[in-house]
Image (tube, grey):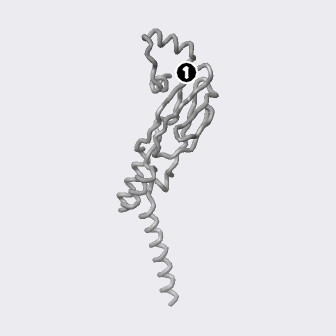
Amino acid sequence: MRGRKKNHQATTRLTALFAALLLGGCATITRGTTDTLVITSEPPNADVRLSNGLTCRTPCSLSVDRDEELVVTIARDGYEPVEATVTPKVAGAGAAGMAGNVVFGGLIGAAVDAGSGAMYDLVPNPLHVKLVPLEEASRGRAARGGTRETAQQVASDG
């Protein structure tokens, strides 16, 4: 009688472990659904506002959903404001998590990872921008015939 009870407990534990593997997405478990977005600027102490309402002052880091596209506005008095877009992209680690789901037969886990955003990384991250002084920006626009530099061009310089 004692041996049966022990076998039943072992079977129950094994079944629970197997169910957890199938029901939980590998990337969701190993990477989580949020990421830390790091934002820096030259010069520092610029005000940052994300399209989801979060704010900070550079240099800073914010916890955001991995699957959320964000518009980041960075501004400081005396400088041209910059607007950049941070987008979710399938990450190497996220793809590995999805592959783990396929290997272990976890179609439910794959759906969880895709739905939770755990398979994504935010790009660019860290986001670094070089702010242009207003007078320098004005001179640059005049030299280019009055056209305005886009935020992405400014964000990718330097």
In the rendered structure, the answer to whether residue 86 lies left or right of residue 79 reads left
Q: Indicate the quadrant where residue 42 lies.
A: top right
Give the residue at mark 1. Answer: 80
Q: Identify whether 47 is placed above or below 5.
A: above
Q: Position of residue 136 (x, y in %)?
A: 54, 13
Q: Residue at x 56, y 44 (%)?
A: 63
Crowding near pointer 1: few (<14 within 10 Å), some, many (20+)? many
* Residue nearer the viewer, 16 or 134: 134
Q: Residue at x 45, y 9 (%)?
A: 143
Q: Residue at x 50, y 90 (%)?
A: 1
Q: Identify whether 60 is placed above or below 8.
A: above
Q: Position of residue 154 (x, y in %)?
A: 48, 23
Q: Position of residue 119 (x, y in %)?
A: 43, 49
Q: Identify whether 93 is placed above or below 14.
A: above
Q: What residue type is disc 1 on? A: Glu
Q: Position of residue 12 (x, y in %)?
A: 47, 76
* Residue nearer the viewer, 88 or 16: 88
Single out the residue that lies furthest toward the bottom.
1
